[in-house]
Image (cartoon, grey):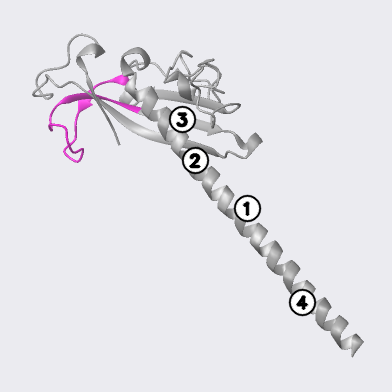
Amino acid sequence: MLAVSLIFLLLLSIVAISLMRSGQLEVLMAGNAQARLGAFELAEGITDAALSRWENNLDTEEWVCSNGHPNPDGKCDRFDLAWDPRLNPDSGDPDLLPQVEGATVTARAKPLNDGQPGCVPSFITGIAHGTWAFFFDVEATFDNTAVRQGASQVNRGAVLVNPVSSDCYSNPPQGNLDKYAHLRSS
């Protein structure tokens, strides 16, 4: 009887340990999913913040990178891409978001179409077809895996539109980018 009880106790212990490990694995998976989503949202926020400062950031002919960007392809023309200092761990901002502290955060904006303006195609909604526009690709990278906050990279297209142009087929853009006040991202 004692031997049967010990065997039964051993089986129950094995089942309990298995359930406990399974529960721990589920907690780790949920934590990883949360970190991945948080990293994605922070990378999206960096992209939005860089695009919202287009007057100081974007040039139609230069690849603009953030300070500390790894520049793997050697195409960065300047390293002064700026965004909200609360998202930049190097800014020293007292209101720095706690999720960003200690993270590696970089961004880059590159002009498409060799920096030349083009007509807004009809498939882009919310912008009058036939309007002059500049097209950019903006990427942002967030990496805080050192403290299990996740890592993510986001690439997004942006269209810098001249709201006063009416017909890009006959009137080329004049002046500087300050006239291009409406920035759309897609």
The answer to which quarter of the image holds residue 8 is bottom right
Looking at the picture, how far across and down is residue 84, in whole percent?
Answer: 42, 20
| Residue 118 versus residue 153 in the image, above or below | above
**What residue type is disc 3 on?**
Ala
Of the numbered discs 3 and 4, the one sitting upstream in the chain is 4
Q: Are marks 1 and 4 in contact (CB under 8 Å)?
A: no
- Compare residues 155 and 39 and report the one nearer the observer: 39
> Is 129 part of what is drawn in magenta?
yes
Q: CA distance from mark 2 to mark 3?
A: 14 Å
The answer to which quarter of the image holds residue 176 is top left
- Compare residues 165 and 20 and report the one nearer the observer: 20
| Residue 101 versus residue 22 in the image, above or below | above
Q: Which mark is residue 38?
A: 2
Q: CA distance from mark 1 to mark 3?
A: 26 Å
**What residue type is disc 4 on?**
Leu
- Compare residues 68 and 131 and report the one nearer the observer: 68
SS label for mark 4: helix
Query: On the picture, is 144 further left or further right than 181?
Result: right
Magenta span = 115-136
Of the numbered discs 2 and 3, the one sitting upstream in the chain is 2
Quadrant placement of the N terminus: bottom right
Q: What secondary structure is the stretch in magenta mostly built from?
A: loop
Q: CA distance from mark 3 to mark 4?
A: 51 Å
Q: Which mark is residue 12?
A: 4
Q: Are marks 2 and 1 in contact (CB under 8 Å)?
A: no
Looking at the picture, how far across and down is residue 14, in whole percent?
Answer: 78, 73
The residue at which mark 1 appears reads as 28
Q: CA distance from mark 2 to mark 1?
A: 15 Å
Of the numbered discs 2 and 1, the one sitting upstream in the chain is 1
**What residue type is disc 1 on?**
Leu
**What residue type is disc 2 on?**
Gly
SS label for mark 3: strand
